[in-house]
Image: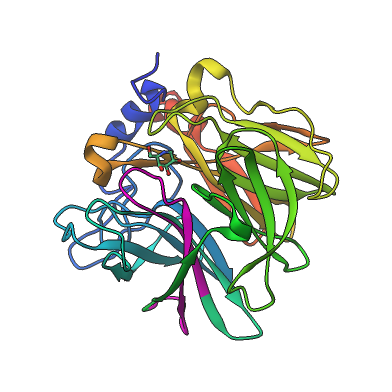
Amino acid sequence: MKNKYGLPYFVLLFSLLLPNGFINARPSGKKTKLEFFQPGQSWPDQDGNHIQAHGGGILKIKKNYFWYGEQRGKGLDPKFRYVSCYSSKDLLNWNFRGNVVKMLPPDSLTAGWILERPKVFYNAGTKKYVMYFHLDDKGYKVAQVGIAISDKPDGDFKFVRRFRPLGHESRDIGQFIDDDGTAYLVFEDRPYGFRIARLSKDYMDVEKEMTLVKAHMEGGAIVHYQGLYYSIGSALTGWNANPNKYATAPTLEGPWTEFRDIAPPETKTFGSQSTMLIKVTGSRKTTVIFMGDIWRPKTQYDSRYLWMPLELGDGKLSLQEPKPWKLNVKTGESSMVESQITEPASNKK
Ligand code: DGJ
């Protein structure tokens, strides 16, 4: 049985059954320490607050991961748009580093303006952290990217400019860094499909189109895995979930295969929408994580996340039913923790 977000009830039940303090183990003054991922559940940061990094992206610098996303917490000044930043060494326990963007509408934009899906690249040449985001007016007609830069990963980021990449409409954006370090922007170009384009040397511009995929998809995400590029996107259904799909190609230029469902279509991607694919290459294995948002448009501060390791290889990709799972970022191994939970302790021999 599923709840309205398409998640199995046992996921919810299981979190209620856990001994108090196991997930949010936080005797006063101590930091929250999570043991495993719980897709779809509230995800506390180390201070115990639900993570606010929606439509986000992950940047890895040495052994540190940074998670940037839309800050949609309660009590924010509605004049501003905010981007949050969190850091972690294990992709599970996140330390809130602050709102690294707090921005008034640039020039002609007015109330209700949009800043969504921030993604940060680090440019080793200029030593700048370069943030791209979707910038728009209330009606989503402006369709631009904005760029903001910082000397440090945790800001402050200063707004630089806004534009349409290569002159095209750009709404949802995605970030892809290839194994050779080359940085790409994925952007939805409503009349045509979505484009994958290489950034300029200093990352301050979108320089060269690699491909136009003639599929109307947003939430675009890419991973390069065992010699193939896998691209995931969602249909255009506003905040409502839909069956996300994937295609593969031997090079970013294509040719791209037809798009196929990443999960049983009736689950609508288990109620989520893609935002990024995270490749964790460890000493023993590589795990690719589907990073998705479970939007709650009326209570955005309570929008959730669905992160699950994907099954992929040989041109096939699938997102399994969300379950609690563990990750070892050192070895790259992931495992489900369901069996440890569903079996009552008294049944153990
Ligand atoms: C779908 C996009 O993926 C989201 O980022 C957001 O722009 C919503 N549409 C708005 O309806």
Q: Position of residue 40 (x, y in %)?
A: 39, 36
- Using residue 222 as the reference point, say whether residue 110 is left or right of it: left
Query: Which residue is found at the position 40% from the left and 13% from the top?
Result: 1
Instruction: Say if the magenta span includes residue 242.
Output: no
Residue 142 vs 193, above or below: the answer is below
Q: In this view, does 1 lie above or below 36?
A: above
Q: Is residue 122 left or right of residue 133?
A: right
For residue 48, above or below residue 321: below
Q: What stretch is highlighted in magenta?
A: 130-155
Residue 300 place in picture, x, y as percent: 27, 43
For the residue pair 346 and 151, the one nearer the viewer reads as 151
Q: Can residue 114 be seen in this view?
A: yes
Answer whether residue 277 is visible to the viewer in this image: no
Q: Judge whether residue 139 is colored magenta.
A: yes
Tell me which residue sits at (51%, 28%) in the image. 269
Q: Place residue 203 in its image quadrant.
A: bottom right
